[in-house]
Amino acid sequence: MDADVGPVPLKGSCPSPHAREETSPTDPAAPRAPAQAAAQRRDVRTALSRRTAPLWPAHATVAPSTAAATRRDWQQVHRLAGCEIQYHALVLRRITTAYVVDVARPCFEAGWSIADILHALDWTPQGVRYTHDSVTGIENPGAWFAARLRAWTHQDGTPMRSLDQRAAAEAEQRRAEALAAAERHSAREVQPQTAGVGPGVSGAAVESQEAAEQDRQPFRVRWAAQIAAGRAEASRSSGNR
């Protein structure tokens, strides 16, 4: 036996090869979320837990109120809208607000509201509710969120009309139909007064106006006029004989 060979170590006195691999500083770390993203998610959870009022109105378009808005203004508005979406859709709190905004930005630019986004998570464009809810069993919230919004896009990738936009278009159509019906009704009422342009109609209108004026005269005047008219008619009859 060589003198350089040491004694065989006792069983369990050294770590297994797999244990050494796990603790090796040269091995790559296991896949995990970046520290910045994890910190951002913690900040969002903290902010949403303290939320006392909506961060952005549910049925308002996601855009700054001023026309001369800067890029920073747009980023702030989108961030508030993204956080508000995460407040209602709990599964989206597992991803960053920046990712939520990136997925929803085409819808925001098309005039969608937060309520439209939340509606698209549970309903198809055909008005059918998804059988799977948005709470449990979602392994990849980002891919799920993108797929639900992708169902509301045309073949060219542009978003369809949202629920609020459809309701607004239907309300505008009803207002236009009501206005047209009111105009037709007004035209029917004005037509009998202005249609009397022919000789027969104009004569009847003049006679009716004269009769109305005579009815407003005192009874003695009307009685004397009737007696005079009767005498005139009798004299004409006697002259014709």
Image: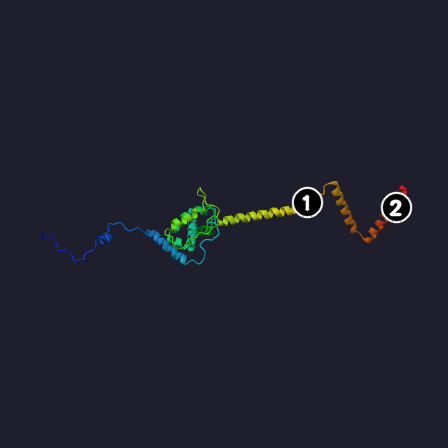
Query: At 34% across and 53% down in the image, what residue appears?
Result: 38
Q: Which residue is mark 1?
A: 191
64 or 50, which lies in front? 50
In the picture, the disc for residue 234 is 2
Helix, strand, or loop for circle 2?
helix
Helix, strand, or loop for circle 1?
helix
Q: Residue furthest front?
A: 131
Can you say which quadrant of the picture contains the C terminus?
top right
Residue 28 is left or right of residue 92, and the answer is left
Query: At 40% across and 50% down in the image, what residue appears?
Result: 144
Q: Amino acid at mark 2?
A: Ala
111 or 201, which lies in front? 201
Instruction: Count up the numbered dots.
Output: 2
Find residue 117 and report its horizontal and vertical position in percent: 45, 50
Query: At 76% across and 47% down in the image, what residue appears?
Result: 208
Q: CA distance from mark 2 to mark 1?
A: 42 Å
Q: Amino acid at mark 1?
A: Gln
